[in-house]
């Protein structure tokens, strides 16, 4: 059997595992079928690429558990054509999943070395995704509003700048806390009010301010 055949089989098993864990949004599951997770990690990690585990990246960052990526994507409730802001590009896998679901993705990474590597990869794999080197706490006010905002790192609190960039009727999914992070979904009801829901605890790398130059 070829390596590609083995990876394909592992991907199918991962998708079934996600179903068993409660991922029911077919758009999410189809995106996991389209996007090759092994392309977002070093080749020596390919045997683990379709296991439900986090994997290490540059500069102490990680590519999140597939379940976490799927869970956040499901909470967002993507509609085709949604304008999405992602805070924390990381490997680029989450952005690729959202793009495969039909979203127009704008993603920010604060670590220059990781940004450069991931930007080059996304140019090859999915050139529709727009990448930025920047401070996620600031967001992208010049491109706001966004129908959806996703934060892929643990924030100590919800950044006011991101709330202000959420469109009325839009959703933000963000893990909030210190040692562990409570997954929150915030819906903008009107110009002044927001509705907040919580969905259990997760572990993320911390959300930090300012650009880290190489």
Image (cartoon, rainbow, N blue to C red):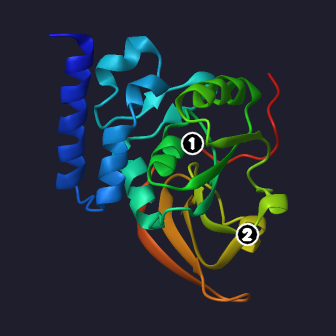
x and y percentages locating residue 129 in the rendered image: 62, 42
Q: Residue at x 65, y 24 (%)?
A: 120
x and y percentages locating residue 167 in the rendered image: 68, 75
Image-based side of 108 in relation to 177, left or right: right
From what the image shows, is residue 31 above or below residue 39? Answer: below
Disc 1: which residue? 205
Picture quadrant of residue 11: top left
Count of number-bearing discs: 2
x and y percentages locating residue 154 in the rendered image: 58, 52
Classify mark 1: residues with Cα within 10 Å, few (<14), some (14-19) or many (20+): some
From what the image shows, is residue 4 above or below residue 24? Answer: above
Residue nearest the observer in this picture, 160 or 107 = 107
Q: Residue at x 58, y 25 (%)?
A: 124
Badge 1 marks a residue whose secondary structure is loop
Q: Is residue 166 visible?
A: yes
Disc 2: which residue? 145
Q: Quadrant of the C terminus?
A: top right
Q: Quadrant of the N terminus?
A: top left
Residue nearest the observer in this picture, 159 or 43 = 43
Q: Residue at x 61, y 42 (%)?
A: 128
């Amino acid at each position: 059997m070829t390596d590609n055949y083995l990876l394909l089989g592992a991907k199918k098993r991962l998708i079934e595992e996600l179903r068993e864990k409660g991922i029911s949004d077919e758009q999410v599951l189809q995106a996991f079928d389209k996007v090759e997770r092994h392309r977002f990690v070093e080749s020596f990690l390919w045997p683990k690429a379709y296991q439900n585990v986090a994997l290490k990246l540059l500069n102490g960052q990680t590519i999140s558990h597939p379940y976490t990526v799927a869970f956040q994507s499901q909470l967002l409730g993507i509609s085709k054509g949604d304008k999405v802001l992602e805070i924390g590009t990381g490997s680029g896998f989450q952005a690729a999943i959202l793009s495969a679901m039909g979203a127009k993705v704008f993603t920010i990474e604060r670590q220059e070395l990781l940004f450069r590597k991931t930007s080059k990869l996304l140019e090859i794999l999915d050139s529709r995704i727009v990448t930025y080197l920047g401070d996620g706490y600031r967001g992208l006010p010049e491109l706001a509003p966004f129908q959806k905002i996703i934060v892929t790192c643990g924030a100590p609190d919800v950044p006011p700048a991101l709330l202000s960039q959420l469109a009325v009727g839009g959703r933000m999914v963000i893990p909030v806390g210190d040692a562990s992070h409570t997954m929150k979904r915030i819906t903008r009801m009107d110009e002044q009010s927001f509705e907040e829901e919580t969905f259990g605890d997760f572990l993320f790398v911390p959300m930090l301010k300012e650009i880290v130059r190489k």
